[in-house]
Amino acid sequence: MRSPYFLIKIFAGDRPVSRFGVIISKAVFKKAVDRNRLKRLIFDFIQKKQSGFKNGDYLIIALASASQLENRNSVFAELEKIF
């Protein structure tokens, strides 16, 4: 699945729980502090919506345009559209 800000790849999993990975490159944010902040926001969204995901492996890749997302609500809204 794709949005202007994120690319999400879903892989079939044989485990009883879902697993998540997040990739944010230097093309999105030059500073590690900013990349880690976005990563924490994404994992916060995942934690709040954990029961709504099917079993599988999810890879969330932030695209370069994700740097335009300014606050927590905009990140949550964008991820909500995708899922």
Image: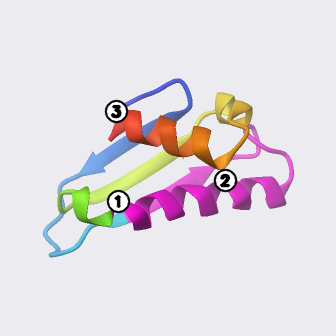
Quarter of the picture containing the C terminus is top left
Q: Is residue 35 magenta?
A: yes
Q: Is residue 11 left or right of residue 6?
A: left
Q: Is residue 41 magenta?
A: yes
Mark before the other along the chain sequence, 2 or 1:
2
Mark before the other along the chain sequence, 3 or 2:
3
Amino acid, disc 1: Lys
Q: Cβ–Cβ below 8 Å for labels 3 and 1?
A: no
Which residue is disc 1 drawn over? 49
- Determine the secondary structure under disc 3: loop
Q: Is residue 9 left or right of residue 42?
A: left
- Residue 42 appears at what percent x and percent y? 54, 55
**In whole angstroms, how far apart are the C-alphas of marks 3 and 2?**
19 Å
What range of the chain is rendered magenta? Answer: 20-49
Which residue is disc 2 drawn over? 38
Q: Nearer the viewer, mark 3 or mark 1?
A: 1
Which residue is disc 3 drawn over? 1
